[in-house]
Image: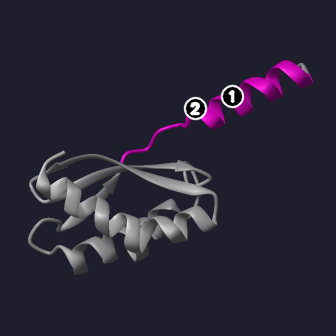
């Protein structure tokens, strides 16, 4: 892991992940490009209606404040988590929809 990503992970561990984990969520760094950090929200945060607000008020705010020379914006890559796929499969299988 390069030094920039290591610094970003440290801020996430200290300032962001505790709040996300309190709500059953997690965050994963995808990549950093031109001072835009691309992340995936996982667990209960994946697909949450408040994900954009969480990103702006928590993730982006903390990273820009702590590392303004590295991060100017945080962009959430929208994905469907494996956990959500499994839940959907169970519902379809068990409820014969």
Under tag 1, what secondary structure?
A: helix
Image position of 36 with respect to 30: above or below: below
Image position of 85 with respect to 71: above or below: above
**Residue at 23%, 55% in the rendered image:** 37
Q: How many marks?
A: 2
Which label was assigned to residue 82? 2
**Residue at 47%, 39% in the rendered image:** 79
CA distance separating discs 1 and 2: 6 Å
Marks 1 and 2 in Cβ contact (< 8 Å): yes
**Residue at 58%, 32% in the rendered image:** 82
Q: Say which residue label 1 marks.
A: 86
Is residue 97 at least partly visible in the picture?
A: no
Q: In the figure, residue 10 lies in which quadrant?
A: bottom left
Give the extent of the magenta segment: 77-95
Residue closest to the eye, 70 or 9? 9
> Is most of the magenta stretch helix, strand or loop?
helix
């Amino acid at each position: 892991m390069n030094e920039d990503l290591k610094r970003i992970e440290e801020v996430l561990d200290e300032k962001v992940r505790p709040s996300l984990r309190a709500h059953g969520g997690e965050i994963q760094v995808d990549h950093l490009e031109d001072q835009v950090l691309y992340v995936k929200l996982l667990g209960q945060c994946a697909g949450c209606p408040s994900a954009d607000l969480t990103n702006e008020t928590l993730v982006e705010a903390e990273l820009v404040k702590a590392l303004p020379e590295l991060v100017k914006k945080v962009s959430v890559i929208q994905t469907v988590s494996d956990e959500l796929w499994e839940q959907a499969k169970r519902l379809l299988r068990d409820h014969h929809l």
